[in-house]
Each structure stands twice: as structure tokens, then as C-alpha cells.
Image (cartoon, rainbow, N blue to C red):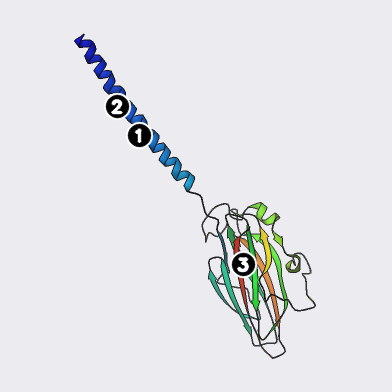
Amino acid sequence: MLAMSRFQLTCRVVFGVIAVMVLMSARTVAQNAGVVLNGAVSETVTLSVPRILPPGTIKTDVVNSGNRVDITFSSADKDGVIRLPLLVRSNCGFEITGVLESSSAVVAQLVITSVQPTGSLVSRQAVRDVNIAKRFDARGPGGKFFPESVELSQSLLMLSGPRISLGGTLDSPGNALEIVLLIRLKSDSGSVASHLTLLASPAL
């Protein structure tokens, strides 16, 4: 009887330890599961202009700030032209709006002439399914010229599209979509000056 009691006591101790270990493991799994469920990646869209720009007749000052680009144009001539490359990165659908402020120039042309990937970390769908507003779409030979001035005093949607970046960081060289803007300014006063603000955001 004594031996049996000792055996029963030993079993109870062993089973008790096992039960405690099982409960602790279950609690750890539950905690880890909670971390996974609560660790969603936030939607991010960034917009920037490279430091080195192609030559043009317009002097350009650019300020990049995350999902916003502020561009100031100036020229001593009555006419000015520049091609401006924009780099867009996103882990979600995106849209880009623009607002133009001009006191001494008429925007004779503001169009998108090309959209192309910068590397292998750009989704093919992003290039194929980018949606450019008709008034700004000048892709293809010949381009597009507007007979009247372009009005952008209020924020207008210029383009939108699906997720762009398949990986990389906010400054990786091969995960951005390059969008080229062609801007032409005219003035009767002998010089041109204008300010363009572009804002990128997750698509609604």
C-alpha cells in the first residue's frame, strides 16, 4: 500500500508539472498569435524627384518630403520647357494629385509622357494597369499639346494605379515606378515663374 501511495503521489506530481507546462505553452502561443494579428503593415506611398534632372530651359527647385513634392519653376525667357521624372513607391494602390500656383506664367502644357519600371522589384501590374487622367495622358509618339492653358488651381487627380513595389526600402533603386512629366510655361511679361505641388496617397 505504501509503495502504491508513493507511485500515485509521483504520478500526480508528474501530471501536475505537465499540466503547468501545457498551460504556459498555450498562453505563449496565444500571446504570439496576438502579436501576429496586431502587426499589420501600414499602407505607404512615397513620391520623389531625383536630385539630378535632365537639362531644360526652366530652372527647377525641388523639395521632397515623403509623399509630397514641391517644385518651383523659373525662367528668364518667355517660354520654358522641362521634363520632370517622378519616382513613386507603394505597398498598396496609389493616387497622385496636383495643384499649380502661377502668378506670372501660363501653363501651356502639363502632360505625362512615359511610365516605366526602374527595376525587377516593380510589379508588372503597376505598369500595365496605371490609370492616367485623359487630359494628362501623352504617352506614345507625337505627344499631346493643349491649345489652351492648363487649369490646376484646385487639386486634380492626375493618375492612379495598383501596388508598385514588391520589396526593398523607401530608397531602393529598383522598386519605383518612373513617371515623366513634361511641363511648358509661357509668359507675356518676359519671365516665367510657377509652383507645382504633387501629393501621393493610398487609393481609397
Front position among marks 2 and 3: 2
- For disc 3, the marked residue is 86
Mark linked to residue 2: none
Quadrant hosting residue 64: bottom right
> Label 1 belongs to which residue?
24
Q: Is 90 placed left or right of 187 in the picture?
A: left
Q: Secondary structure at mark 3?
A: strand
Residue 193 spot, x, y in % from top left: 64, 84
What amino acid does circle 1 point to? Met
Q: Secondary structure at mark 1?
A: helix
Q: Residue at x 62, y 67 (%)?
A: 86
Position above or below: 163 against 31: below
**In the depicted view, which residue is nearer to us: 198 or 178?**
198
Please tell me how crowded label 2 is: few (under 14), some (14-19), or many (20+) other residues with Cα within 10 Å: few
Mark 3: amino acid: Leu
Circles 1 and 3: CB atoms closer than 8 Å? no
**Which of the marked residues, 2 or 3, is nearer the chain's N terminus?**
2
Q: Amino acid at mark 2?
A: Val
Q: Residues within 10 Å of mark 3 (few under 14, many from 20)?
A: some
Q: Position of residue 128 (x, y in %)?
A: 70, 55
For marks 1 and 3 on the same chain, the one whose residue lies earlier in the sequence: 1
Q: Quadrant of the N terminus?
A: top left
Q: Earlier in the sequence, mark 2 or mark 1?
A: 2
Residue 91 placement, left or right of 11: right
Closest to the observer, 56 or 15: 15
Q: Nearer the viewer, mark 1 or mark 3?
A: 1
Residue 62 on image: x %, y %? 56, 75
Question: Which residue position holds label 2?
Answer: 17
Question: Is residue 99 left or right of 1 when viewed as pictured?
Answer: right
Q: Secondary structure at mark 2?
A: helix
The spot of residue 4 in percent (x, y) is: 23, 11
Q: Residues within 10 Å of mark 1 (few under 14, many from 20)?
A: few
